Image (cartoon, coloured by chain):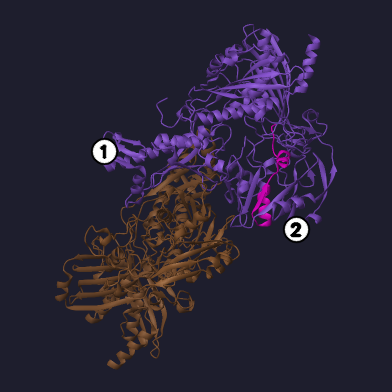
Chain colours: A purple, B brown
């Protein structure tokens, strides 16, 4: 790395003041003249006919403006996805599905009236889990799943479509990713590990429940949506698609996001927009925690059957995986990424990954930070651990031996670019937690490896210099996990100004610039490149202006401290604001100092991680106490180490939550713990200290060598927990979360066997 | 002109729907959560000490939150201009000056309380008019006028400054523009015309009174201002300057403007921002019509002594002008533009123009469409008319003989670029109103010439193609007189899309792009060039994308109907939205279709006009009935003839108002007709049909040859009225407006003399 002034140093996030003082504007803070308040009424059954909705009592309540049902708002075609669902028609398909909306002049009036709504259901048999679903005895979509073009024919043909003669099925998609001959290789392997792993559905558990404010636009069919989202362009497309509007007539203004983790791409937006257009008033809907957990899109239940084969030296020879993803009502498409990672951590010539996307009468699932990967790696990394034990190898060294490098293949057959998995393992090898393991009875240290390829898309960004020397960056991305704070540093570094002189201008769908959604760990890479490009162009403009003003060679100009200076000539300096002012005010130009930057990288910047967890297990109760966690992650170059560590710690905490605590509980298709009392996630007293160890193996594509950061930290924690428990107790738990009950029972079985 | 698809054709304005249906958002429509309402209390005296302000009764009124005075809000330095004034301190300087502000929870509560405010004044002697002011017996600013840097020393030295020994004076600035020897030339002239002309102060009379909403920002010292303005950057500078804030902490969001005419550059903004920051709540202030007329910045009173000399052939040989501009409390600087135009319509070797900017205890004056020029040309064009009569020449031919062309000098000595004054006169020569004049007794036809050099500054603009094919233009200008509608046509023309596919994104001070204020007739020239540049760059990007997609030569691609097509190959066509979508979504790029355009023209595109007015004068009463008006204007190229004609007709109407009706009436420094009952301006029944005749003598600098349009139409109407009255009655009225009383009296004098 060349020397830096601002990048690579610990910096507070730019919106800390607003967040700490309560002036940051979240969607629930939006208050518009004439605004109404909407409360959804959710189905209590996973599958039922809606016989009738009696709104009479509700409508007589004070302040009630309307009670709306699917008859009022739906467009007569089945929604192909959760984000395009408005209200249930005459059939509810999952417990938690919005059936009606009460609109009133206050939140309280709407809630009071919603409680009086009398919905008469005719309960139908439901498909409650993947196992039942795969029998196809009862079909969730007897005529095929609805598609985006409005037809009811399944993508696989189905009776209604009739193009392929393929029967409608609850298996929405079945894929096989294969290279070599995994089964043959297993036959001839020196050691084989075979296990089935399962996990509970978990929820993203963002602090801010879903919230949307919609306001009719100036012309019929126009609507503005204020929303807590990770990607305004996605929300625009979903709202326009659901409501049959033109994209240009849907204006999405992304608000401060109180946690997204993949779940904030538009769930209520179409509904609230439809309500707003119907009542012709601004409408706000803010979900309660229970509503949010019932009606949003958690992470799926995944059952993974995995078989590993290796030779005597520990070289992996076979990987055979069968993954059943229980998606709920709509298939979400986790298979590709699961296959990419589960078949892409270790070099192996014989790989077969078969995936099943299965639908049930449960709430549709969606993305949760590294979607599907924590669950898949729980299976892989638990099995690798067992393989090491079976072979008598050190689990770290076995991983190191097999770990992928540049040119090795992902599970879907693409070659990895230059990556830092081995660099992480090398650092892990020396860590005290690993060096000192095995010394305290009742304790165990678990190791697991994770990673994420990272999305990458083109992005634009604008850099402007204002007349007072303020540098403004216009971005179309949403600030999740402090990523805009890094954009500020990139510009400050490039233009020789203090970070405080750089401001972010947040774009709406109308204003742009275009940027991909803040997900897939791609923003720093995609947007960062565009910001760097724009800043460099502006730098060139400033150098030209100063060179002209001082009649100096451009190479002799430097940008320092908000000024353009002639090197070595004291007094020959001018503020960049003054340069901008002259450029834009002076008749004849050259005009404003501004540039439109773009990034269009041709390869991603994948990030890998090694995670350790040290636990203590109470032999009397099976209670697991996490004592220490370590995340060792290759981030390429830490643009702002403080934020990188925050990401690593946050992701690790979530991984520990998936490993130790979290699980949505269903009874016959209905969620029974939709609240933070009964849904247990890591709280301060349930988390150990988390050490973040930054490894910097530079990427060729990210700005200043940076790699993706956000997703890797969640990927290996659950597996590390299971491996730590195994280390402490000798028990291999194959079900997430690793519950004291199950562990205690298995410990009893093991004691009996000993 | 090359053939055009959209430009040069009659097109409705883009925001007509919003304006007609009432959904356009004006500042008074802004309603923010927790917003308070402010009413100013204005001084009733032109000059007085404020002994005390008793707010007790007001503060007990329901809903009153605060009564604020200069002690609460002022920063302890005298404001150097009207736009930086907050509240009066212990001295009021003009009748209409805000002394206090009452802040309450509703407009009505604030008004009720404001009526109870008890202000005890100690009335002081005042400087009521220019004549009195120029004696310097009583000084408006005894210690010199306040300056922007906060010192109380006059720019001319003054007692307090003491740097030059020059005495403080009510003559704020005295300038002489001179070439040749005008006095000597007058001595030897064949014919000399000498007259003094005066005019009443007139008001811009926009339909929407001044209105501002200010809202404190997220951090201390930050404020957002929603305002009816022609230039958000000017407002930002004024608010920041007045309140001692950083530019970047003042965010100005320009709202729909209900008429500006030069008056909307920030009058109340600093005050409302100060109130808002003081009470820490959003605050709205909307002036009543009377308050608006009392406290804003009308056009000045101007006294012009003019002497013209000519030889026998009618060639102008001398022009000697003395202009006294009564500015009110602050000098505004009308002198330069008056000199430019009054000395720049006719070729003349000997010119002397002396200007006096005089301050009085009246409300500060400001810009009103072609500031000072209608008044100055009333003097010049009346005198030219007299000269023609004196010489027995046709007044049109005399003007044609002397009319300036490219290379001739303005009154301040700059050469004109290629201009169309003679082209307008040629067209006027053939007009039936001129051909048919002199045939009806009691009627007269007046001719006058006007023009405006036009400002020009650099501007930026962004053009983006969205994935649905929508083209967005980001502009930092404010849409006055439909100028954004022309921007849409420029983009549509360049990109081969329908104008309906082009949307304007209005910039704030934060978002940019930079554009000069919408004044000085410059937006079409400055911004239009930037829009054209941006559109052309986007066109190139689209052609490249399509050429790649179709594997065709770029020259074979055409953009038609929202598509890129391979010429002559049916079916080889792709929507530009699809091209944009691929470009911005596809990993590896090339990224979004967008370009930052800029214009930095090096010369203006001046516009000239010939105006005819036909009047009938009632010999019994002196009542003047305008029967017909014609405006013949060189606009270079009419981007949208309908809007150009609208400008020409509106400006002509205002010129007729100045000529026939309008005048602020003062009694001892206090305005006595601050309302639309007593301040008479042209209403539908007082206006004749106005014919707009477009002359297109292309400019070398404006987009597609366009010239400035906005200001010329107001410049010659008043003079044409006076000349028509002269033609009808033989009486030369030298005072504006030409009132029936004065005319009738002079007609009596003339009858007696006959």
Q: Which residue is mark 1?
A: A552
Residues rendered magenta in the picture? A271-299
Q: How far from the left and from the top, in percent, is residue A655?
A: 65, 26
Of mark 2 and mark 1, the one earlier in the sequence is 2
| Chain name for mark 1 | A
Q: Assess whether residue A298 is covered by the magenta stretch.
A: yes
Count of residue discs: 2
Q: CA distance from mark 2 to mark 1?
A: 75 Å
Q: Chain of mark 2?
A: A
Residue farthest top in this picture: A312
Residue in the image at 23% along x and 78% along y: B194
Q: Residues within 10 Å of mark 2 (few under 14, many from 20)?
A: some
Q: In this rendering, would B289 be left or right of B202?
A: right
Residue A726 percent location from the top left of the image: 70, 15
Residue density around tag 1, few if under 14, some if 14–19, many if 20 or more, within 10 Å: some
Choose between B482 and A483: the one closer to the eye. A483
A723 is higher (above) or lower (below) than A118: above
Q: Point out the image quarter for the C terminus of chain A.
A: top right
Front residue (pair A547, B396): A547
Local secondary structure at mark 2: loop
Comparing A437 with B630, the one in front is A437
Query: Magenta stretch: residue A681 in it?
Result: no
Write down the residue under mark 2: A62
């Amino acid at each position: 790395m060349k020397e830096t002034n601002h990048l690579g140093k610990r910096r507070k996030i730019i919106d800390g003041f607003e967040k700490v003082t309560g002036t940051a504007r979240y969607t629930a803070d939006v208050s518009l003249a004439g605004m109404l308040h909407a409360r959804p009424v959710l189905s209590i059954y996973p599958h039922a006919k809606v016989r009738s909705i009696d709104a009479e009592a509700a409508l007589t309540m004070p302040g009630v403006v309307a009670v709306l049902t699917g008859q009022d708002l739906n467009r007569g075609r089945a929604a192909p996805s959760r984000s395009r669902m408005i209200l249930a028609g005459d059939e509810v398909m999952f417990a938690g599905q919005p059936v009606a909306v009460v609109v009133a002049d206050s939140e309280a009036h709407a809630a009071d009236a919603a409680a009086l709504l009398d919905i008469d259901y005719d309960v139908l048999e439901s498909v409650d889990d993947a196992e039942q679903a795969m029998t196809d005895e009862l079909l969730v979509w007897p005529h095929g799943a609805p598609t985006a073009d409005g037809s009811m024919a399944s993508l696989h043909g189905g009776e209604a479509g009739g193009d392929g003669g393929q029967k409608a099925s609850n298996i929405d998609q079945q894929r096989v990713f294969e290279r070599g001959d995994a089964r043959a290789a297993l036959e001839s392997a020196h050691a084989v590990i075979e296990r089935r792993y399962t996990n509970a559905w978990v929820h993203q558990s963002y602090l801010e429940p879903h919230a949307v404010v919609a306001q009719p636009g100036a012309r019929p069919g126009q609507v503005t949506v204020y929303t807590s989202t990770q990607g305004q362009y996605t929300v625009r497309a979903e709202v326009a698609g659901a409501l049959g509007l033109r994209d240009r007539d849907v204006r999405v203004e992304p608000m401060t996001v109180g946690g997204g983790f993949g779940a904030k791409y538009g769930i209520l937006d179409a509904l609230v927009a439809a309500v707003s257009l119907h009542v012709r008033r601004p409408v706000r809907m803010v979900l309660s925690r229970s509503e949010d957990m019932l009606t949003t899109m958690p992470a799926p239940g995944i059952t993974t059957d995995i078989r590993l084969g290796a030779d005597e030296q520990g070289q992996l020879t076979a990987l055979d995986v069968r993954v059943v993803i229980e998606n709920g009502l709509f298939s979400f498409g986790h298979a590709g990424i699961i296959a990419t990672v589960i078949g892409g951590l270790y070099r192996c010539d014989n790989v077969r990954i078969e995936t099943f996307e299965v639908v049930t009468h449960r709430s549709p699932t969606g993305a949760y930070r590294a979607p599907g990967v924590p669950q898949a790696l729980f299976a892989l990394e638990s099995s690798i651990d067992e393989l090491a034990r079976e072979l008598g190898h050190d689990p770290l060294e076995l991983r190191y031996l097999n770990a992928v490098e540049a040119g090795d293949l992902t599970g879907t057959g693409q070659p990895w670019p230059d990556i830092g998995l081995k660099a992480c393992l090398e650092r892990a090898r020396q860590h005290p937690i690993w060096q000192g393991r095995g010394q305290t009875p009742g304790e165990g240290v678990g190791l697991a490896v994770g990673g994420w390829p990272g999305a990458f898309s083109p992005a634009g960004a604008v850099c402007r210099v204002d007349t007072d020397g303020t540098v403004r960056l216009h971005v179309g991305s949403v600030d999740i996990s402090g990523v805009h704070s890094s954009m500020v540093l990139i510009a400050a570094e490039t233009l020789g100004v203090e970070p405080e002189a750089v401001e972010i201008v947040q774009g709406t769908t109308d204003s742009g610039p275009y940027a991909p959604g803040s997900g897939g760990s791609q923003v720093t890479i995609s947007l960062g490149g565009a910001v760097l490009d724009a800043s460099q162009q502006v730098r060139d403009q400033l150098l030209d202006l100063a060179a002209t003003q001082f009649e100096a060679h451009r190479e002799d100009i430097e940008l320092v401290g908000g000024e353009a200076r002639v090197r070595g000539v004291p007094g020959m300096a001018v503020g960049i604001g003054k340069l901008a002012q002259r450029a834009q005010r002076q008749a004849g130009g050259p005009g404003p100092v501004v540039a439109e930057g773009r990034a269009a990288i041709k390869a991603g910047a994948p990030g890998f991680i090694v995670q350790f967890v040290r636990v203590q297990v109470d032999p009397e109760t099976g209670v697991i106490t996490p004592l220490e966690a370590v995340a060792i992650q290759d981030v390429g170059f830490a643009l702002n180490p403080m934020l990188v560590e925050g990401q690593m710690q946050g992701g690790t905490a979530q991984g520990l939550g998936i490993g130790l605590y979290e699980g949505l509980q269903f009874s016959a298709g209905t969620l029974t713990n939709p609240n933070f009392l009964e849904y247990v996630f890591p709280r301060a007293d349930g988390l150990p200290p988390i050490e973040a160890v930054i490894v910097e193996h530079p990427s060729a594509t990210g700005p200043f060598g940076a790699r993706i950061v956000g997703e890797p930290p969640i990927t290996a924690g659950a597996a590390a927990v299971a491996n730590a428990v195994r280390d402490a107790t000798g028990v291999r738990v194959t079900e997430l979360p690793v519950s004291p009950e199950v562990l205690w029972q298995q410990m009893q079985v093991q004691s009996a066997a000993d």
